[in-house]
Image: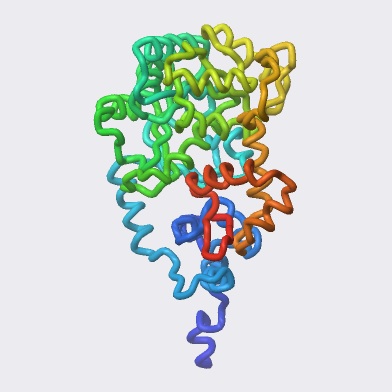
Amino acid sequence: MTDKDLHPSSTHPPLPPTQEDEQFARLRLLRSRRVGASTYKRLLTEHGTAQNALAALPEVARAAGLSDYRICPKGVIQAELNAAHAAGARLLVQGEPPYPDLLHDLADAPPFLWLLGDPALLMQPMISIVGARNASSLGLRMARRLAEDLGDAGFVVVSGLARGIDAAAHDAALKTGTIAVQAGGVDVIYPTENAALAHEIAERGLRLSEQPMGLRPMARHFPSRNRIISGLSRATLVVEAAARSGSLITARDALDQGREVLAVPGHPLDARAAGCNMLIRDGAVLVRSAADVLEVLAGLNSSGPAGKASPAKTCRAPTPPARPPKPSRSLRQMAKLHRQILSRLGPAPLAEDQLIRDLQVPSTDVAPALVDLELEGEIERQPGGLLSRIG
């Protein structure tokens, strides 16, 4: 018998990675610096496995101008898994049940979601309800009534666990089903004043997040959270919102995703209603009660793909009278411009003036759109008037 016979393992190819190994590597890839959902999916497509993508990541980073790049350490991922086990959280992988089809279809769908609560709610029809944190008494009453009536009609209410309208909608829908999408880790309750509500949702509903366990939310995490709120359902309902608010970002996400936007009107002199009134002016469905919402949802369900409702079921605000100077772009037009800008930008920097020439859009329209995208963490400004896309 030869030495080769005594040590056959030395000449055998290594065993393929197990499902657990690949999942660990995928989570490590996603948690690495500057790797968002889009980059994650591109790397997997190009390299076949997460192990191969991790091996190639430092060179990819160098090509993008990042020196001394380090991938996420294994210990960080193990700590996240340990924290999830301690909290009782479950990891849901994109493509595996009960990952919702509507969310799966998004180009930037989260590859992983941490869940606390009842995952079965993700298989039921959903309606997203968002609104102002400093809501009025009437706004809170309206949110509660809408959430309760829509829950009784068989819809799971999705919101963001914020104070104000979000909290009112969650609370009213606890008995029928509610999902809270969190900006930080699923085990981190924010704001703390909603701690009791958050615990109830984990017991009777579902809390979920794409962020690592233990992550405390920062401002840049909320726009990412908003796309999941709108992405889970065919329609987003805004109850109260100021002219510049996170609720309008969620509404714009819904439009970007091809979903319907609905809004509750308010008094023209109430700043908390300004955003909703703008949405209605720009074509959002005016909502007076749950019946208006159910009519739109029935049209969406009968028409098939998200966002392709029958015209007879979708109300449109009348065309406003002609105004002197050029009006500002509508929310739908801004969403289209955002998509155009993001389609032109990539990891390689591009001069802002070249982008404007390529778009053939006035710079006065492009400038505010760039500010919005920068605040949302979609693009990054670099020295010399250069722009690049993040993730």
Q: Residue at x 51, y 49 (%)?
A: 374
Query: 391 or 372: which is nearer to us?
Result: 372
Residue closest to the far front: 324
Q: Is residue 334 visible?
A: yes
Q: Is residue 95 visible?
A: no
Image: 213 above or below 46:
above
The colour scheme of the drawn protein is rainbow
Q: Quadrant of the C terminus?
A: bottom right
Image: 373 above or below 175:
below
Query: 316 or 186: which is nearer to us?
Result: 316
Q: Residue at x 36, y 25 (%)?
A: 133
- Relative image position of residue 230 (x, y in whole percent): 54, 31
Query: 205 or 313: which is nearer to us?
Result: 313
188 to the left or right of 126:
left
Q: Residue at x 42, y 36 (%)?
A: 208
Image: 371 above or below 387:
above
- Relative image position of residue 79 (x, y in whole percent): 32, 56
Number of callouts? 0
Task: Indicate the quadrant where residue 202 lies.
Answer: top left
- Relative image position of residue 293 (x, y in whole percent): 57, 13
- Relative image position of residue 274 (x, y in whole percent): 49, 21
Task: Indicate the quadrant where residue 262 lies.
Answer: top right
Residue closest to the far bottom: 2
Q: Residue at x 63, y 14 (%)?
A: 296
